[in-house]
C-alpha cells in the first residue's frame, strides 16, 4: 500500500475513532420526558412534556388527545385536520419543557420551563394564555403551590416564592454553593415548606414568609428528590446512598444505606417504604427500624424513578430499558418487559387505576423514554403492552 | 467499551477535586498536565518517527519517480528503503492511536464530572469507582464568576467569559506553530536543497495550523467553560513540552532519544541545536515562501 493510501487510511481511522468515542459517548440531552396525569376538560389524560413540546395522551388507547369545541365536536384546523391538545415551544421563543405543570387560575396550567419562564396554557384550547412569566433561572422539577405563592425550584440557585400572576419574587432560599440549586419539588405541609437543595441541605421554612423553622440540615449528599411525609416524619434520599428519617422538628432519627444514589422519592404502601437506587437495587425498608425487610439488585443498570407499588407488585423501571415487576412480599422478580430497542427509562412511572367511567378497564402503568418513537409505553399489571405513544 | 478508559479518569478527576480544596479548575489543570507528561514518551516516539520519515523523504520521492510505471517494484524499493533506514511506517501511528483513548477519556471526564444536567448527572452515578466520592457531588462549578458547566456565551455566563474561546484559539495556534516549526526545521536540515520534497504535506500542515485553532475556538463557544480550560491547558502543556530546555529534561526523565539510530546519531548536537533555532529558522522559511 502506498504512503498516500496509508495516510488516507490513517486519517479515516482517526476520524472514525474520534466520532465513535469522542462524540457519541457524550450526553448532550438536558433531561427526560416529564410525565403525569392531569384533568383536561373533565377527562384524565397523560401529559408528556419533553423538549419543545407538550402532548396530551388518551390513556385508553395512547392516541393524541383531540381538542373539542363547546358542542363536544372535534376542532378542525385550516387544512381540515383535527386539532390536537399540544403546546409547541417554538411558538414561545423555543421554550423547553422538562417538568409537569401546576394548576393556575380557572382553566390554566402553569408550565415551568428550562428557558427561564413560566408558561400559562389555556386548557380548553391548548394555547398560551397571556405572556410568559420571566424567571431568574432554568427549571427542571415541578413547582409547588400554596394559596399565596408559587414555589419554583431554580436549577442553579435555589427556591423562589413568586406571585403566580406577576412572577414577582416574594422571598427566596439560595443554595450555599454558587451554581447549585434546587433539582426537586419542595414539599408543602401545614404551612411549612420543606425544601431539598442539591447542595446537601434540607430546609424547613414558613411557606408564607420564607423564615427558617429550623436550621438547615446537612444530609452529606446531594438531594434531588422530594421528601416523603409519612406518619409525622420526613423520608429523604440522598446521593450519599442514604435514606434519612427526620422528625418534623429537624432531627435525624434513623437512616438506611442503599447501594448507590437515591433519586426517586420513597413510596409508602401499607406501612412499608420502597426505594430504588442507581445501582439497580430495590429495597423494602421498615420505617420504624429503618432496616431492610428485603433488598434485591434486580436491574443491570440504575433505577431512577420511584417504584410504583400495588397489592401484589413493586414495579420499577431501569436504565437498562426494562420494566420489572417484583413480588411485594420478598422482592423477587415476577417478570420483566423490555421496551423496544431498550432505551433508558428515566421518567417517573405513572400509575393509572382502572376507571370504567373513563373507559380504562384495567390498572395500568406508563413508562417514559427519550426515544421519540417510544416516548410513553403503557403496560397492564400482567405485563402486556397496551399502547405506545411517539412523535 | 470506552467506559474502561473514561470511568477511571472521571474518578481520578473527582478525587483530585477533593484533594485540591474542592477546586475543579485546578483538578482539570493538574490532571491534564499529568496525562500530557505521562504520554510524553509516546509524543516523543511519534516525533522521532515523523523525523525519520522526513529524512528519507527525498529518497522516497526518487523511488516514486523512478518506478512510477511499476507499482510492484516501487513498493519493493520503498520497503527496502524503510528496512535500510530502520523506519517503520506504523511507528508514527501507533503512539498516536494509544494517545487517543487517553485524550478522549480526559475530555469526556470533564463533561461527565461537571454534569450540568439531570441527563448527565444520572450517568455519573455509574462512573465513580471509589466509594465515598459520591458525597462530593455536585462539584463546585462556579469559578471566577463563570459557570463551568455552561458555554461561555451570555446570558449563560458573563461577557468576560468570551476571553476563553480567544485563549483556546491563541494557545492552539501557538501549539501548532511550535510543533510545525520543529517539524519544518527538521525537514529543512535535510531537504533544503529540494524545496518540493514533502511540500504538499507542509502546506497541508500550515493550513491545519490555521484552521484547527479557529475550529477549536468555535467549539469552545458551544462547549462548556470547563472544556475550554481543558483545551487551553492541553495546548499550553504542548507548547512547554517543545520548549528546548524543558524538552531536554523530559527526554532525560523518560529516557527517550537517548540512543538514536545511526542517521540521527551522526549529528546529535545539531539535532539538539536545531530545536533551539527552530522558531527563527522556520519563521524565515515561511516568510520567504
Image (cartoon, grey):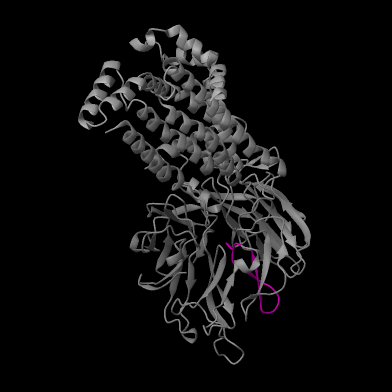
- Who's the residue at 53% across and 30% down the image? B32
* Residue A262 visible in the displayed image: no
B15 lies above or below A114: above
Residue B236: x percent and y percent? 57, 27
Q: Nearer the viewer, residue B286 or A356?
A: B286
- Who's the residue at 52% across and 38% down the image? B133
* Residue A103 visible in the displayed image: yes
Relative to A143, A38 lies left or right: left
A281 lies above or below B173: below
Residue B282: x percent and y percent? 53, 20
Tell me, yes or no, whether the highlighted magenta stretch contains residue B232: no
Tell me, yes or no, whether the highlighted magenta stretch contains residue A111: yes
Q: Nearer the viewer, residue B63 or A19?
A: B63
Residues in magenta, as a range = A96-112
- Who's the residue at 63% across and 62% down the image? A113
Relative to B280, B86 lies left or right: left
Amino acid at each position: 500500500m502506498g504512503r498516500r493510501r496509508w495516510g488516507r487510511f490513517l486519517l479515516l481511522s482517526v476520524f472514525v475513532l474520534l466520532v465513535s468515542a469522542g462524540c457519541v459517548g457524550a450526553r448532550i440531552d438536558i433531561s427526560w420526558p416529564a410525565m403525569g396525569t392531569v384533568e383536561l376538560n373533565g377527562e384524565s389524560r397523560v401529559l408528556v412534556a419533553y423538549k419543545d413540546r407538550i402532548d396530551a395522551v388518551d390513556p385508553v388507547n395512547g392516541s393524541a388527545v383531540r381538542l373539542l369545541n363547546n358542542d363536544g365536536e372535534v376542532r378542525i384546523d385550516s387544512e381540515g385536520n383535527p386539532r390536537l391538545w399540544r403546546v409547541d415551544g417554538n411558538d414561545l421563543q423555543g421554550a423547553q419543557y422538562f417538568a409537569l405543570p401546576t394548576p393556575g387560575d380557572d382553566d390554566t396550567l402553569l408550565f415551568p420551563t428550562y428557558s427561564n419562564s413560566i408558561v400559562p396554557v389555556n386548557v380548553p384550547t391548548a394555547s398560551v394564555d397571556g405572556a410568559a412569566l420571566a424567571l431568574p433561572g432554568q427549571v427542571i422539577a415541578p413547582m409547588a403551590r400554596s394559596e399565596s405563592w408559587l414555589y419554583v425550584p431554580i436549577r442553579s440557585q435555589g427556591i423562589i416564592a413568586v406571585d403566580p400572576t406577576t412572577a414577582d419574587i416574594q422571598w427566596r432560599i439560595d443554595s450555599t454553593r454558587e451554581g447549585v440549586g434546587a433539582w426537586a419539588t419542595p414539599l408543602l405541609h401545614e404551612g411549612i415548606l420543606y425544601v431539598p437543595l442539591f447542595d446537601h441541605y434540607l430546609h424547613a421554612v414558613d411557606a408564607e414568609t420564607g423564615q427558617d423553622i429550623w436550621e438547615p440540615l446537612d444530609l452529606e449528599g446531594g438531594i434531588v428528590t422530594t421528601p416523603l411525609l409519612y406518619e409525622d416524619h420526613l423520608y429523604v434520599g440522598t446521593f450519599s446512598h442514604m435514606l434519612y428519617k427526620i422528625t418534623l422538628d429537624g432531627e435525624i432519627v434513623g437512616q438506611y444505606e442503599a447501594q448507590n444514589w437515591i433519586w426517586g422519592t420513597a413510596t409508602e404502601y401499607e406501612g412499608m417504604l420502597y426505594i430504588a437506587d442507581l445501582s439497580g437495587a430495590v429495597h423494602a425498608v421498615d420505617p420504624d427500624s429503618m432496616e431492610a425487610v428485603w433488598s434485591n439488585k434486580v436491574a443491570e443498570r440504575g433505577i431512577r424513578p420511584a417504584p410504583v407499588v400495588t397489592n401484589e407488585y413493586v414495579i420499577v423501571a431501569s436504565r437498562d430499558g426494562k420494566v420489572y415487576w417484583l413480588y411485594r412480599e420478598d422482592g423477587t422478580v415476577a417478570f420483566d418487559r423490555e421496551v423496544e430497542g431498550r432505551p433508558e427509562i428515566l421518567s417517573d412511572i405513572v400509575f393509572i387505576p382502572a376507571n370504567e367511567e373513563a373507559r380504562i378497564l384495567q390498572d395500568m402503568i406508563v413508562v417514559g423514554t427519550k426515544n421519540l418513537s417510544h416516548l410513553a409505553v403503557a403496560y397492564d399489571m400482567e405485563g402486556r403492552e397496551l399502547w405506545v405513544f411517539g412523535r | 467499551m470506552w467506559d474502561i478508559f473514561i470511568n477511571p479518569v472521571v474518578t481520578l478527576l473527582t478525587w483530585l477535586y477533593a484533594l485540591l480544596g474542592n477546586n475543579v479548575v485546578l483538578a482539570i489543570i493538574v490532571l491534564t498536565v499529568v496525562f500530557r507528561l505521562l504520554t510524553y514518551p509516546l509524543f516523543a516516539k511519534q516525533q522521532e518517527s515523523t523525523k525519520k520519515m522526513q529524512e528519507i523523504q527525498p529518497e522516497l520521492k526518487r523511488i516514486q519517480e523512478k518506478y512510477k510505471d511499476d507499482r510492484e517494484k516501487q513498493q519493493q524499493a520503498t520497503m527496502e528503503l524503510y528496512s535500510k533506514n530502520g523506519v517503520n511506517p506504523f511507528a508514527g501511528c501507533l503512539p498516536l492511536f494509544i494517545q487517543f483513548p487517553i485524550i478522549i477519556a480526559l475530555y469526556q471526564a470533564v463533561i461527565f464530572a461537571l454534569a450540568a444536567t439531570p441527563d448527565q448527572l444520572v450517568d455519573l452515578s455509574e462512573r465513580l469507582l471509589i466509594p465515598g466520592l459520591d458525597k462530593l457531588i455536585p462539584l463546585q462549578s462556579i469559578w471566577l464568576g463563570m459557570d463551568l458547566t455552561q458555554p461561555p456565551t451570555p446570558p449563560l455566563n458573563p461577557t468576560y467569559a468570551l476571553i476563553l474561546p480567544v485563549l483556546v484559539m491563541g494557545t492552539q495556534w501557538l501549539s501548532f506553530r511550535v510543533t510545525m516549526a520543529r517539524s519544518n526545521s527538521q525537514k529543512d536540515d535535510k531537504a533544503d536543497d529540494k524545496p518540493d520534497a514533502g511540500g504538499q504535506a507542509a502546506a497541508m500542515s500550515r493550513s491545519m495550523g490555521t484552521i484547527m485553532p479557529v475550529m477549536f475556538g468555535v467549539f469552545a463557544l458551544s462547549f462548556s467553560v470547563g472544556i475550554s480550560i481543558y483545551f487551553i491547558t492541553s495546548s499550553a502543556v504542548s507548547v512547554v513540552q517543545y520548549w528546548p530546555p524543558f524538552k531536554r529534561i523530559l527526554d532525560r526523565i523518560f529516557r527517550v532519544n537517548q540512543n538514536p539510530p545511526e542517521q540521527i546519531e551522526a549529528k546529535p548536537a545539531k539535532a539538539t541545536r536545531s530545536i533551539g533555532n527552530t522558531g527563527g529558522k522556520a519563521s524565515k522559511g515561511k516568510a520567504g515562501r
